[in-house]
Amino acid sequence: MEEIGTIKEKRGSRLTVEIERSPHCAGCGMCSPSAGGRNLIEVEDNGSGALAGDKVVLSIPGSDILKVSFLTYVMPLSLFFLGVLLGYIFLDRGGGLTAISGIIGLLTGFLALKAIEQELKKRDLIKITVKKA
């Protein structure tokens, strides 16, 4: 997947790039929303030679997109169903407590997702390639 953006800031080898959110990247969570429907993402410069104000192309390998999609959708949903199952087995077999335990599982999934997302960003485990446009 490729996105076109503008470098807003360069600090050492870190770039802050403003991209316009396209339909195919609409919910991955890798970038932070900014004013005007644009999003900011911080990436490691891989020797592109780009400076603040330059247009760049950000490329993300398909395998990394699959990782992010799995974490974003499958993990919270799986924990929801695990919560429902555990609530059914250990609580009241089909009543309101089963639904509550499912919601607790879903919230746990979202909290775990946030923690994992921060770790992915910190360690740069999602490889984003930067090149001048």
Image (cartoon, rainbow, N blue to C red):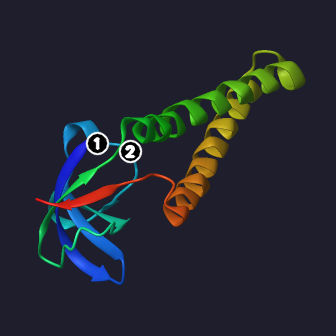
Residue at 45 percent of width and 36 percent of height:
69
Q: Position of residue 36 (x, y in %)?
A: 14, 62
Rendered position, 22 above or below 56: above
Rendered position, 50 above or below 74: below
**Three-letter amino acid code of the residue under disc 1:** Cys
Q: Position of residue 86 (x, y in %)?
A: 81, 26
Q: Position of residue 71 (x, y in %)?
A: 53, 39
- Front position in the image: 36 or 72: 72
Q: Secondary structure at mark 1?
A: helix
Residue at 49 percent of width and 33 percent of height:
73
Q: Which residue is mark 1?
A: 25
- Residue 37 visible (yes or no): yes
Kindly identify which numbered label has been placed on residue 64. none
Q: Which residue is mark 2?
A: 28
Identity of the residue furthest to the right in this view: 90
Q: Quadrant of the C terminus?
A: bottom left
Q: Residues within 10 Å of mark 2 (few under 14, many from 20)?
A: some
Q: Quadrant of residue 91?
A: top right
Tell me if 119 is positioned left or right of 34 in this view. Answer: right
**Three-letter amino acid code of the residue under disc 2:** Cys
Q: Position of residue 40 (x, y in %)?
A: 28, 64
Q: Quadrant of the N terminus?
A: top left
Residue at 68 percent of width and 27 percent of height:
99
- Front position in the image: 56 or 86: 56
> Are dots 1 and 2 in contact, CB under 8 Å?
yes
Rendered position, 42 above or below 116: below
Q: Residues within 10 Å of mark 1 (few under 14, many from 20)?
A: some
Identity of the residue furthest to the top in this view: 94
Q: Label 1 to label 2, Cα distance in Å?
A: 6 Å
Q: Secondary structure at mark 2?
A: loop
- Residue 38 visible (yes or no): no
- Front position in the image: 55 or 101: 55
